Amino acid sequence: MVLNVSSPIRTFQYTVKGDPEPESPTRFTLRTLTSEEYSEVTANSPLTSEQIAQIDEVSKAARYEGRKLTAEEQTRIDEITQNDLKYPLRAMKQMALVVRYGMLKIENLQDLDGNPVEMSGAEFAGRADPGVMCELGLEILRITRLPEGAAKNS
């Protein structure tokens, strides 16, 4: 008998939207989360998986256009999170956990002086710009939730 894994790990390359160095962007090698990791992330989430998907949908245009959320988009996210003042801190902890699990490698990362920097996903999660960490975390969660064949077309 052959056993099949329900969610095989997939890796993918990702470049943050609006990277300031388009000729030599910072590239992230990310992977999907295991079922156990995904369960831990969602169990520690201040949001339900449905709310996460809704926020992802609302913020998608801003991410792809490399811009900040509009007032209307932010209002919609506030409605989804029920304007919970604890949400941003708890969500950042969740995204840091997602990035720790899902980041395999970083290429072309530089410090503020332009010097090359190497660090692990866990270290990056502790030092990253909150917007970049959220973008990476949401992308990892989005790809994790996609069926295997759909990831190639996303």
Image (cartoon, grey):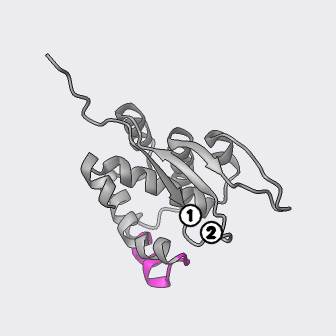
Membership of 21 in magenta stretch: no
Amino acid residing under circle 1: Val
Amino acid residing under circle 2: Asp
- Find residue 23 and report its horizontal and vertical position in percent: 65, 70
- Find residue 86 and report its horizontal and vertical position in percent: 54, 56
Image quarter of residue 35: top left
Decide: marks 1, 2 in contact (CB < 8 A)? yes
Question: What residue is shown at x 68% (from left), y 42% (from top)?
Answer: 123
Identify which residue, 85 or 48, lies in the foreground: 48
Residue 86 in view here = no
- Find residue 119 and report its horizontal and vertical position in percent: 71, 42
Residue 29 in view here = yes
Q: Magenta stretch: dominant SS?
A: helix
**Which mark identifies residue 19?**
2
Looking at this view, name the residue that lies furthest to the left: 1
Report the Cα–Cα distance between label 1 and label 2.
Answer: 6 Å
Element assignment for label 2: loop
Region rendered in magenta: 66-78
